[in-house]
Amino acid sequence: MSVKKLRYLLMVALLAMSLGLVACGSDDDSGEDAPAEPTASGESIQANPANGNAPTLTIGSKNFTEQIVLGEIYAQALEAAGYNVETDLNLGSETVALAALKKGEISGYPEYISTALTSFFDTAPEDVPGDVNGAYEMAKKDLAGDGVTALPPTPFASANAVGLLTEKAEELGVTQVSDLEGQSQDLKLYGSPECRQRIDCLLGLQENYGLEFESFTPVDIGLRYEVLDKGQADLSIVFTTDAQLGADDTYTILEDDKGVLPAGNVTFLTTPEVVEASGPDYEATIEMVQEGLTEKVMQELDARVDLDKQQASAVARDYLVASGYIEE
């Protein structure tokens, strides 16, 4: 059986577990499980012809795998609900994405709650509530004051993390970020271009941990593991939902022992004007298709794009079909 097929079956199994559903064995002798019925809410997306009269929705996302997959999930789900939908899945940083939303260039995009609080409102990472509901309510209030509507969050949370090869971690004798003290000045750190200005990235490592590095090199987010594999980087800023972290013990994540790199569930950001013009199916559809997005499922979706080199649009559709939100 191919690796891609195995990954697909794993995704289906994870979806079934995350939705609290039981998969039925197939009737043939392959031993493979059939996708479970249907979603956690027991609903599939119903097309509403009236939604076609609403203004066209442009769904955006930042330009890395997890965001693009999420953008595709939301866009395809809304299209299934009868909306006219376009996408802009290459927005860059969160500041660029928020600016596009405020200008009306996009209708909405997925954002990490902790990123919204720390980047848009200068909330110190240690002041971001530890529980998702508290963090969401804080972000929702702050964003509303800025003319932005934050929809309820996803089940999964994703956070920046300091990653390195396990053999390098053992060589350095490090298990948490504080262990880098006295060694970081000899280590090369790679991260996304905006990492230099972000408190939950390089800036936080410098200001809250007092770490200085031999060098910091901006790198495309898709190369954050490759630079470790090739020995270009000693340390790389990765995400806790990255598929590579669940594959084997090749990589190690250092414990954020000072809580500088806060966890973040995703909230879909939009505007009151878009919500009003789009009608109730807009919010309801977005909230519905999030129900199955646990951390394990998100890792699997990311893996199918990053490791199996599948198109994000196809992976998003498979998720929606396997969950029962849309038909094959």
Image (tube, grey):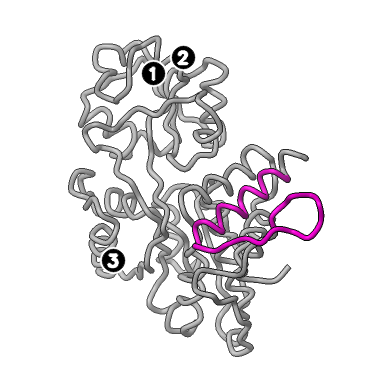
Residue 288 place in picture, x, y as percent: 49, 71
Q: Nearer the viewer, mark 1 or mark 3?
A: 3
- Which residue is tagged 1? 215
Q: Residue at x 56, y 36 (%)?
A: 222
* Picture quadrant where residue 22 is located: bottom right
| Residue at the image position 40 percent from the left and 29 percent from the top | 253
Distance, label 2 to label 1, CA atoms, is 21 Å
Q: Which mark is residue 23?
A: none
The mark nearer the N terminus, 3 or 2, is 3
Which residue is rendered at x = 47% and y = 20% of the image?
165
Q: Residue furthest left?
A: 127
Residues shaded magenta: 5-33
Total marks in image: 3
- Tag 1: amino acid: Ser
Foreground pick, 275 / 325:
325
Across and down, in percent, residue 192 comes to 45, 35
Label 1 and label 3: CA atoms lie apart by: 37 Å
Provide the residue designation for mark 3.
140
Q: Is residue 190 above or below residue 104?
A: above
Residue 167 disc label: 2
